[in-house]
Image (spheres, rainbow, N blue to C red):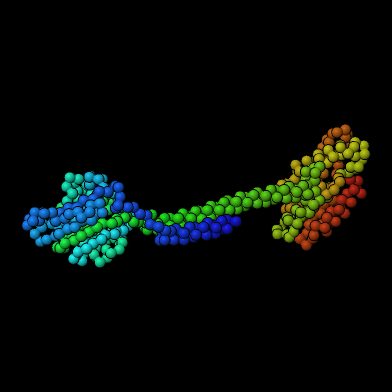
Amino acid sequence: MKSNLYNLIRFIAVIVTLLAVLAQYYAPKKQFDLHPSSITSHSIYSAIDPNTGRQSATWISESREDWACTYTASLEFGCGYSLSWGSDPSHGMDLSRYDGFKIKIHYSGSAERIRLFIRNFNSAYATADNESTTKFMSTQLRTNELDHEIFVKFSEFSVAEWWITENQVPRQFVAPEFTNIFVIGVDHVVYGTHRVRVEKIQLVGDWVKTENFLLGIIGLWMVILLWEGLSRFYRLYQRSREGQQLIVELVNSYQKLETEKNEYEVLSTTDVLTGVCNRAGIMHHIQTKYRPRTDLKAIGLMIIDIDHFKRVNDVHGHDVGDKVLISLVEIIVANIRQDDVFGRWGGEEFVLLCPISSISNFRGLADKLCGAIEQCQFGHGITHPITVSIGAAVMADADSFDITFKRADEALYQAKNSGRNRVVYAN
């Protein structure tokens, strides 16, 4: 779903980029009329001819911006025409947002070129009361081009060398500057009679500068790519967090299952009444502890059976019988080691497995258990002693549990038939 969103946004960005490029190069330009305009005022300037006493420039029709100039070698300087907007040079117009002028001028005369000039005010090098300190920039127009409207770029203008020299301008201010233009005009630098009519001066430029436009497009794509990258990174981060959470949940579930499994294993191998191993628990210990045999110690096996236990149940009830079983287990557990395996085989029959260092120690343990049980006062209305019969056998290296158990069971049978309350050892 997110991939489709990314593709859609990229597609929209491509469409927007193409439309912006087309608009930048084919949409109508930004325009501003300097002439004719109500915000500008015109004037002509000239020198007095010392031979005739006349001005070198005169209006033919001021309302039509039509004027003439006679420029001779006897004159101190030439003559020209200017447009200005306001009397204070320090409050000009910022033309740097435009690319240049559209100009339409009608010329007649012998000159091949006329000069187009502008002046910029900057308090770093100019003073408002001395116009000659303002930066003079100019370009020359071929008169044979003036039969129709032409476009003059600001990049064609250069700063006059005489202005730089005359005002001793620092190097950092000698480049063209268009941030505070207060006058624009045309003048003549070639001797002769000239007639000029300024019909149109119009500022033209892009709505957005090309460099700003390109930076905007680059910025747009950088924002989109950055957003997509951060979005993808955040999604990966979220997935990583979700994955980690899932792993934690799985580990917890595994641990819970493992705990439950262990609990079930304990329950399945534990006698509910007495808390010691049941038959399954005894067999589990045999499988894990004694098979295969990894040591040289002998294993002693006892089958312990309560004498006349049925009589206890019949006379005193099963509740008392259960308490007798619990008490008997407590006596035996108190007299064996932790490493010994002891459990209830079934009913009133119990099995004890224990590593032995000598036969005499094994016999001593069996006799000890038999005597301890006989000496115990079980209570609960039972006045006669509770005794056990024990069949004991030693597991040889080559013997299996079943073989040893059968031998111990035969010994138990002999103990029962020999009067009970005794231990019989298998050969």
Residue 216: % across, % down: 41, 55
Identify the image quadrant of the N terminus: bottom right
Q: Nearer the viewer, residue 267 or 399?
A: 267
Q: Which of 302 and 360 is in front in this view?
A: 302
- At x 30%, y 52%, the residue is 36
Residue 133: % across, % down: 17, 50
Q: Which residue lies furthest to the front in this view?
A: 61
Residue 7: quarter of image: bottom right
Give the total number of marks visible in the rendering: 0
Residue 387: quarter of image: top right
- At x 70%, y 50%, the residue is 257
Res. 117 visible in picture: no
Identify the image quadrant of the C terminus: bottom right
Residue 350: % across, % down: 82, 47
Q: Which of 408 and 36 is in front in this view?
A: 36
Residue 281: % across, % down: 78, 51
- At x 23%, y 56%, the residue is 66
- At x 38%, y 57%, the residue is 29
Q: In this view, does 395 lie to the left or right of 199?
A: right
Q: In this view, does 264 lie to the left or right of 28?
A: right
Q: Is residue 169 left or right of residue 311?
A: left
Q: Residue furthest top?
A: 381
Q: Which of 293 and 17 is in front in this view?
A: 17
Res. 46 visible in picture: yes
Q: In this view, does 383 lie to the left or right of 189?
A: right
